[in-house]
Image (cartoon, rainbow, N blue to C red):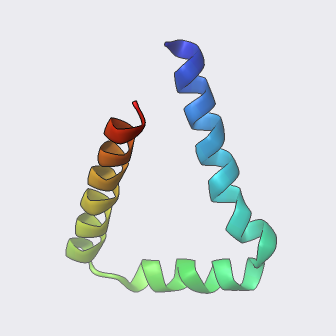
Amino acid sequence: MWQDLAAAVALVLVIEGILPFASPRGFREMMRVVGETDDRSLRLSGLFSMLGGLLLLYFVR
């Protein structure tokens, strides 16, 4: 179980590092836009992201 969790965290770090590595300017611009987004929109995008991840995990497992 702990090994699976560590592998999942490692994959998240790899995936999150792709954009700033490939396009630092684009990443900076994206962070600027996210910083200007209202709380409700950020919460909704986080909710849909979590639900999508849970759905994907359900189908994979």
- Which residue occupies the foreground of this view, 35 or 53? 53
Can you say whether 6 is above or below 47 in the image?
above
Can you say whether 6 is above or below 18 in the image?
above
Query: Residue drawn at (53%, 14%), measured in percent from left and top?
Result: 2
On the image, the x and y values in percent for residue 11 come to 63, 42
Can you say whether 51 is above or below 2 in the image?
below
Q: Total marks drawn?
A: 0
Most extreme residue toward the top, as rendered? 1
Query: Residue drawn at (27%, 61%), measured in percent from left and top?
Result: 48
On the image, the x and y values in percent for residue 55 come to 30, 47
Q: Is residue 26 left or right of residue 30?
A: right
Rendered image quadrant of residue 18: bottom right
On the image, the x and y values in percent for residue 37 come to 35, 82
Query: Residue drawn at (32%, 37%), measured in percent from left and top?
Result: 58
Q: Is residue 42 left or right of residue 3?
A: left
On the image, the x and y values in percent for residue 8 come to 56, 34
- Which residue occupies the foreground of this view, 20 or 56? 56
Most extreme residue toward the right, as rendered? 21
Query: Residue drawn at (56%, 81%), measured in percent from left and top?
Result: 30
- Which residue occupies the foreground of this view, 40 or 46? 46
Rendered image quadrant of residue 29: bottom right
Quarter containing the C terminus: top left
